[in-house]
Amino acid sequence: MDGHARPSRSLTPEPTLKAAPHDQLTLLDLATCDAHLSQLAHRRSAIPELAILAEATAEEARLDDRRIELDTLVGDLRRELRQAEAEVELVRTRRTRDEQRLNSGAVSNPKDLTNLEHEMQALERRITTLEDDELEVMDKVETAESELSGVLEALEAVRSKIAEVTVTRDATFSDLDGQSGELASERSSLASGLPDPLVALYEKVRAQYGSGAAALRARACEGCRLEINGADLREIAATPEDEVLRCPECSRILVRTAESGL
């Protein structure tokens, strides 16, 4: 026995199922179509653009969340700034009114003059404090607006990237889908020319093992890549050509070919 061959597992034909040798050979073409379709589906799910788009879309969502936060912050700060400006203006107006009273000579009582001067000094200190607060809010507004501007620029850039990559992705999808459509049409044509029981068995095996049929070439199954042992090969050689066989190792439909080595 060859050192790479496995011990016999008792090869048996598929019960009651017979198919013309050329129909069995057609199963290999069908399996080739299915293999190529699977490869195309894998390529479609793994094209680089998908990962790039996923990352860019996540970045877009993060930036847009930050944009909303900054929009809200800028709005709140602008309202706070308007309030600060209004309060400063209110105190300035009161100070101006007191200055006018003082300069007009309408207040002549020394005590009233002293009180008015004290009030004006207090208003001046209040104005200084309010103006400091106003400047602080203005700085916050400027910082928030600057960050918002940067986020908007970043959003524009990432959305431009998404649009560009989407075009590339769609072009790749179109190409792969075109190839898949041609293969699917070829597959349908192949399957329609085969007996229903043979196709049913092929589909059942394909669902279980990933591929439904494999050729026997050079005494090895091309599905599992294992060499068939001598006893099984002799049994295969003695089995009528129209009987459908299963590989004793991987259970795929085993299709005999001119290169089987029987």
Image (cartoon, rainbow, N blue to C red):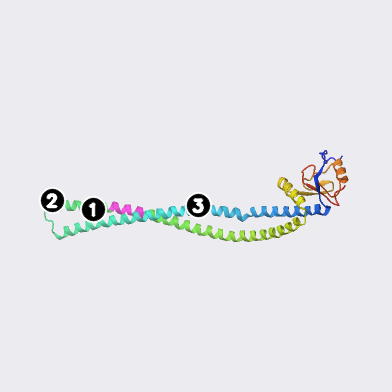
Query: In 3D space, how far apart are the residues under numbered discs 1 and 3 (Cα atoms)?
Result: 47 Å
Rounded to the nearest whole Å, what is the CA distance between mark 3 and mark 2?
Answer: 65 Å
On the image, which quarter does residue 101 sit in? Answer: bottom left
Report if residue 209 lies within the magenta region: no
User: Which dot marks residue 123?
Assistant: 1
Q: Position of residue 116 (x, y in %)?
A: 17, 53
Find the distance from the CA under tag 2 to the CA under tag 1. 18 Å
Question: Residue 193, how many percent across, how many down?
Answer: 77, 57
Which badge, 3 or 2, is on the more N-terminal residue?
3
Residue 21 lies left or right of residue 68; in this view the side is: right
Q: Position of residue 199 (x, y in %)?
A: 75, 51
Bounds of the magenta span?
128-138
Marker count (numbered): 3
Query: SS of the residue at dot 3?
Result: helix
CA neighbours of label 1 inside 10 A, class few (<14), some (14 to 19), many (20+): some
Mark 1 vs mark 3, foreground winner is: 3
Secondary structure mainly formed by the magenta segment: helix
Q: Tell me which amino acid carries mark 1.
A: Leu
Farthest front residue? Answer: 16
Closest to the observer, 33 or 57: 33
| Disc 1, SS | helix
Residue placed under numbered mark 2 in the picture: 111
At a point 64% along the width and 61% down the height, the residue shown is 174
Q: Nearer the viewer, residue 142 or 59?
A: 59
Q: Is residue 133 magenta?
A: yes
Q: Given contact means CB atoms under 8 Å apart, are the residues at marks 3 and 2 in contact?
A: no
Residue 62 tag number: 3
Q: What amino acid is labelled 2 in the image?
A: Lys
Look at discs 3 and 2 and give the one toward the viewer.
3
Q: Which mark is residue 110?
A: none
Mark 3 belongs to which amino acid?
A: Arg
Is residue 152 rendered to the left or right of residue 181? Answer: left
